[in-house]
Amino acid sequence: MTERPSHWRVDRQITLGVLVTLALQTAGGLIWAGATSERIRHLELRVEATAPVYERIARLEENSAYTRLALERIERRLAGE
């Protein structure tokens, strides 16, 4: 059985176009990674700044639940139950 010659060939030469393309893709990837890192840092700073607000809101919600229970208890006493 004879083998047919393959149409695919790997050439060891690297053209200038391939080198420029690789350099541009690498630069684009690094710029994208830097921008993503900066956005993440900005979001982390915003989360750190708003963390105390979330804690205060949670405490206020808990206090309002206790106030609601106390008000219901007072209303039941006033109604004579």
Image: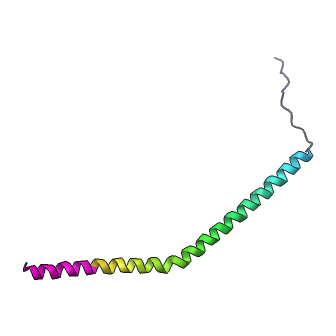
Where is residue 8? Give x, y as percent: 83, 31
Q: Position of residue 36 (x, y in %)?
A: 67, 63
Q: Nearest the camera: 38 or 4?
A: 38
Query: In this view, which residue lies farthest toward the left?
Result: 80
Q: Residue at x 76, y 61 (%)?
A: 30
Dominant secondary structure, magenta: helix
| Magenta segment | 66-80
Which percent across, then down, holds residue 4?
83, 21
Q: Quadrant of residue 63?
A: bottom left
Q: Quadrant of residue 64?
A: bottom left
State the quadrant of the N terminus. Answer: top right
Residue located 77% across and 56% down the image = 28
Q: 62 or 80: nearer the eye?
A: 80
User: For residue 5: magenta?
Assistant: no
The image shows residue 52 at horizontal and vertical percentages of: 48, 81
- Judged left or right of residue 65, residue 2 is right
